[in-house]
C-alpha cells in the first residue's frame, strides 16, 4: 500500500516540474524571438539611414567578431546596397553598392 501512495505523489511532482519547465522554455523562446526581431529592425533602420531610402531585399542577424552584426540588402534607384552594421553600437561597419540590371530581373 505504501508503494501505491508514493507513486501518485511523485507523479504529481513530475507533472508540476514538466509544466513549469514547458512554460519556462516557452517564455525563453518568445523572449529570444522578440530580441531577434528587435535587432533585425534596428539593423534595417541603420541601413536605411545609410542609404537614404529603399526596399529591403534581405536581412540577416549574426553574432560574429564578438558583436551582433546585421547584414541588410537594400534596393534604391536601381542600385543594390549591401550594408553591414554593428547593431548594438548603431554604426555602419561596411557598405557596398552595385547597379542592378533591370533586364536581368
Image: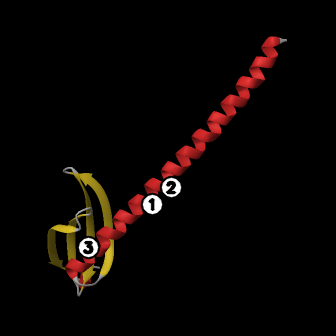
Whole-Å distance between the Cαs marked 1 and 2?
A: 6 Å
How far across and down, in percent of the image, does residue 23 sit? 59, 46
Residue 46 — which label?
3
Q: Earlier in the sequence, mark 3 or mark 1?
A: 1
Residue 19's place in the image compared with 6, above or below, is below
Q: Image check: 104 left or right of 32?
A: left
Q: Is residue 13 left or right of residue 29?
A: right
Query: Is 88 placed left or right of 40 in the picture?
Result: left
- Residue at image mark 2: 30
Instruction: Determine the residue positioned at 71% across, 24% down.
Output: 10
Question: Going by the picture, which residue comes out furthest to the right?
Answer: 1
Q: Secondary structure at mark 3?
A: helix
* Relative vertical location of residue 35 with respect to residue 94 in this rendering, above or below: above
State the residue at coordinates (26%, 61%).
88
Where's residue 81, x and y in %? 20, 75
Q: Earlier in the sequence, mark 2 or mark 3?
A: 2
Circle 2 — which element? helix
Residue 47's mark?
Answer: none
Amino acid at each position: 500500500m505504501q508503494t501505491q501512495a508514493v507513486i501518485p505523489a511523485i507523479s504529481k511532482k513530475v507533472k508540476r516540474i514538466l509544466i513549469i519547465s514547458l512554460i519556462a522554455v516557452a517564455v525563453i523562446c518568445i523572449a529570444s524571438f522578440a530580441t531577434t526581431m528587435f535587432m533585425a529592425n534596428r539593423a534595417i533602420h541603420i541601413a536605411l539611414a545609410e542609404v537614404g531610402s529603399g526596399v529591403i531585399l534581405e536581412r540577416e542577424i549574426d553574432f560574429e567578431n564578438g558583436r551582433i552584426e546585421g547584414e541588410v540588402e537594400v534596393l534604391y534607384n536601381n542600385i543594390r546596397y549591401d550594408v553591414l552594421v554593428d547593431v548594438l553600437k548603431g554604426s555602419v561597419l561596411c557598405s557596398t553598392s552595385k547597379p542592378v540590371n533591370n533586364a536581368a530581373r
